[in-house]
């Protein structure tokens, strides 16, 4: 690290949050102190933008007199060397502009300056001339000599604000400045240690040992649903806190997992700081700042929490590591699970990946010894896993116009009659995926995307789930004008809810989906209601599969298990197995006898057989063997290049130019071909798939390809996705 040369430099490299490929060089005014990691304000064109002083090896050899100067150094802890190295590494790996990666770190400019001090009061030695019972309570409450906020003191003493104000006027209190209030209290690793089973205790000791020893390691905590993985990795978090280190817990749906936050509070006596897109702006500012100065010790966050400016990060836990939500598909395209491992390697600290259904890549890394493999094969307190069975829809189809088979309807009725709960799972939002006219055959399509409009009957709207376009459901066909002849084709969860209400009119049913009106707050209240047993039947999308603990849930019915298999995605079987295993795992978590019924037209499919038999090892062995035969990850490397433009011809022509510029060698270039979703938000899309052997230098190949091809012109945009997860 060349920090000494930057203590009083004439010029410094500054990385600004724009699509810049390298830092810009700025002059440093006389008397201004900067160092690598300092957050500064610099002029860029007509604007003043934030930036980070980068490392000396990026510095240009230019005359400081000819450069624009750094205008301001924020009173903020500098970004650590580990954070800067992580930004550089991720930019190189994903082929993203370093400035755009830095932008994810510098996303809260209002937090760069210190939080304002809070006005407070402190007791003096002066007693008021007139003492009342209320005043006595205030004086007694403040007798410890600590500072209090005005409202906090009144509340603690059980008096009105006017009593406190009167004592201030009498000189019994003096005004002081209090430090900013912490976002969350400091967690106590000894507060509420859980009573672990023998298996849990052994697993906890195994994954906590690397935390105590220090140094990088990656561990897969692989346990069946309900085995208590969260309590196990809490012990690793406790070990990190005992060492004085910060901890990051990544969750795929942090804004919805209130149960995790409650369990954390029960274990550590305080909640973690949250980090996700639904936080209020002021809270985001305070969390960012208190992470930077070390006051926040544990963050539970979505994938973007990887870019918080931790001052002393000592452990990352990736919960539900298999979840597709960890993949960011826009701007800087990265997978948070993989980047968490990189972040741990750069910082020299452990990373724990936790899942009941690990990704094939993670499972392979554990089997080959690259990751430590810690298994929990039994549920906590010896609770039995649900009995699972398929319902062959070819033999026992639903009644005409219905979507629930007779065996599933009968099982739901039995569960409700016993006073227990049931989930009906369908991973399709809305009422119906397609609406058409019975007379002329007109189908309602999105004007800006190559997709059908989905009817949301609760809202009375037709919605596009890709661009957000919406329009009211018309009374007449816009093509032929016929009234009352529009028909909904196929089921969404709203249509299943309609069928449930008809079959069980006295049952308390609820629809659970991430796009329902009311947002995150309503969803949290609904999840709490389910946990308390205030709901009989839950009809939900994949939201219900995400780690929730519903004590009275004894039946899970999967309405359309084949839905995820109906595309050409090479991960289709893996994702179906993961999703169905997770959702059926919601049943019987407290030991009650439970049942999972899976409606399918393909009961012989390997994913269905693996779920019903409970033989996950055989399924993973099959998937790993298939990947090896096709030289797909982890035995090969993939990259996707998406070319989009306002016209189809522009996108296709640039795709062909990119293909023609590909260097020769062992890496194959397939395409360009029209993407399955050929039109999104009015932009036409073509895709090139790049496939190479495991040790191929994919980044060097792609850089050479892009450098040799013509630069995108007009409306053409090119996006590179290393290790793609989606093939749409």
Image: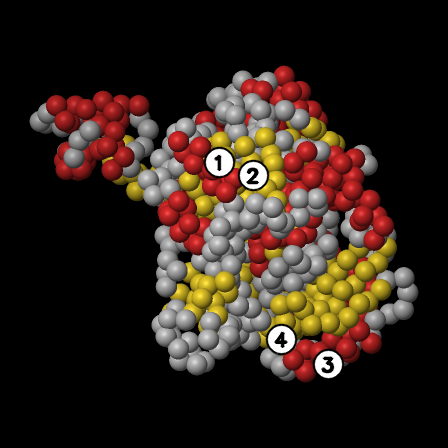
Q: How many marks?
A: 4
Q: Earlier in the sequence, mark 3 or mark 2?
A: 2
Which residue lies most toward the right here? 665
Question: Which residue is label 1 attached to?
Answer: 411
Q: Position of residue 722 (x, y in %)?
A: 72, 58
In the rendered image, the vertical position of residue 214 relative to residue 283, given as above or below: above
Please give the label number shown on residue 684: 4
Tell me the quadrant of the picture where the C terminus can be found: bottom right
Using the numbered discs, state the Cα–Cα distance from disc 4 to disc 2 in whole angstroms: 41 Å
| Residue at the far left in the pictured view | 130
**Residue 120 locus on image (x, y percent):** 29, 38
CB contact under 8 Å: marks 1 and 2: yes
Using a 10 Å C-alpha cutoff, classify the residue at mark 4 as few (fewer than 14 neighbours), some (14 to 19) or many (20 or more). Answer: many
Helix or strand or loop: what does disc 1 sit on? helix
Q: In the rendered image, which residue does mark 2 sit on?
A: 597
Count neighbours of disc 2 (C-alpha within 10 A) and say few if under 14, some if 14 to 19, many if 20 or more: many
**Residue drawn 69% across the image and 38% down it:** 610
Give the mark nearer the N terminus: 1 vs 4: 1
Q: Nearer the viewer, mark 4 or mark 2?
A: 2
Q: Residue tagged by mark 3?
A: 653
The foreground one among 156 and 369 is: 369
Residue located at (45% from left, 27% from top): 266
Q: Are marks 3 and 2 in contact (CB under 8 Å)?
A: no
Mark 3 and mark 2: span between their CA atoms?
A: 49 Å
């Amino acid at each position: 690290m060349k920090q000494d040369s930057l203590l009083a430099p004439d010029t410094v490299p500054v990385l600004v949050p724009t699509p810049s490929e390298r830092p810009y060089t700025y002059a440093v005014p006389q008397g201004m102190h900067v160092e690598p990691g300092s957050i500064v304000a610099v002029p860029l064109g007509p604007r003043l933008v934030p930036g980070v002083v980068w490392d000396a090896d990026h510095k240009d050899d230019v005359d400081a007199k000819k450069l624009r100067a750094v205008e301001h150094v924020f009173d903020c802890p500098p970004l650590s060397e580990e954070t800067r190295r992580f930004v550089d590494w991720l930019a190189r790996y994903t082929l993203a502009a370093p400035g755009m990666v830095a932008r994810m770190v510098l996303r809260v400019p209002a937090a760069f300056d210190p939080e304002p001090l809070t006005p407070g009061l402190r007791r003096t030695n002066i007693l008021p001339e007139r003492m009342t019972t209320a005043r006595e309570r205030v004086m007694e409450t403040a007798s410890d000599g600590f500072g209090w906020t005005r409202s906090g003191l009144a509340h603690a003493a059980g008096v009105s604000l006017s009593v406190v104000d009167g004592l201030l006027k009498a000189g019994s209190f003096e005004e002081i400045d209090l430090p900013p209030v912490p976002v969350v209290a400091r967690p106590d690793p000894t507060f509420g240690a859980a009573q672990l089973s023998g298996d849990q205790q052994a697993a906890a000791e195994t994954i906590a040992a690397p935390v105590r020893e220090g140094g990088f390691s990656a561990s897969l905590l692989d346990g069946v649903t309900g085995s208590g993985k969260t309590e196990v990795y809490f012990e690793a978090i406790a070990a990190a806190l005992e060492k004085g280190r910060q901890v990051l817990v990544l969750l795929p749906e942090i804004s919805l997992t209130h149960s995790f936050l409650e369990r954390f509070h029960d274990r550590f006596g305080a909640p973690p700081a949250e980090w996700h897109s639904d936080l209020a702006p002021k809270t985001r500012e305070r969390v960012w700042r208190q992470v930077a100065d070390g006051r926040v010790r544990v963050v539970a966050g979505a994938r973007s929490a990887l870019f918080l400016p931790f001052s002393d990060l000592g452990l990352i836990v990736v919960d539900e590591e298999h979840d597709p939500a960890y993949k960011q598909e826009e701007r800087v395209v990265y997978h948070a699970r993989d980047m968490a491992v990189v972040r741990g390697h750069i910082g020299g600290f452990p990373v724990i990946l936790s899942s009941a259904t690990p990704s094939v890549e993670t499972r392979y890394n554990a089997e080959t010894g690259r990751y430590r493999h810690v298994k929990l094969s039994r549920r906590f307190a010896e609770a039995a896993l649900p009995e699972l069975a398929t319902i062959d829809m070819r033999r026992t189809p639903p009644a005409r116009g219905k979507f629930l088979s007779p065996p599933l309807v009968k099982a739901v009725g039995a569960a409700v009659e016993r006073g227990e709960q049931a989930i009906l799972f369908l991973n399709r939002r809305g009422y119906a995926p397609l609406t058409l006219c019975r007379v002329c055959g007109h189908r309602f399509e999105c004007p800006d995307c190559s997709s059908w409009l989905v009817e949301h009957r609760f809202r009375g709207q037709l919605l596009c789930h890709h661009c957000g376009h919406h329009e009211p459901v018309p009374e007449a066909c816009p093509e032929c004008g016929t009234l009352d002849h529009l028909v909904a084709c196929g089921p969404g969860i709203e249509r299943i809810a309609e069928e449930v209400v008809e079959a069980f009119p006295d049952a308390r049913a609820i629809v659970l989906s991430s796009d329902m009106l009311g947002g995150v707050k309503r969803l949290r209240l609904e999840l709490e209601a389910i946990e308390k047993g205030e709901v009989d039947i839950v009809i939900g999308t994949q939201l219900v599969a995400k780690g929730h603990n519903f004590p009275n849930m004894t039946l899970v019915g999967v309405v359309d298990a084949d839905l995820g298999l109906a595309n050409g995605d090479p991960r289709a079987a893996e994702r179906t197995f993961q999703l169905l295993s997770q959702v059926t795992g919601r049943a019987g978590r407290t030991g009650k006898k439970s049942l999972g019924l899976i409606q399918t037209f393909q009961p012989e499919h390997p994913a269905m057989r693996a779920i019903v038999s409970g033989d996950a090892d055989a399924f993973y062995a099959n998937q790993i063997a298939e990947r090896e035969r096709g030289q797909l990850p982890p035995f090969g490397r993939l990259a996707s290049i998406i070319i989009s433009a306002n016209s189809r011809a522009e996108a296709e022509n640039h795709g062909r130019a990119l293909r023609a510029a590909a260097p020769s060698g062992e890496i194959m270039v397939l395409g360009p071909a029209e993407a399955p979703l050929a039109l999104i938000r009015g932009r036409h899309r073509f895709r090139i798939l790049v496939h190479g052997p495991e040790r191929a230098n994919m980044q060097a190949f792609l850089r050479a390809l892009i450098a040799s091809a013509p630069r995108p012109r007009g409306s053409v945009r090119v996006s590179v996705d290393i290790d793609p997860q989606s093939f749409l």
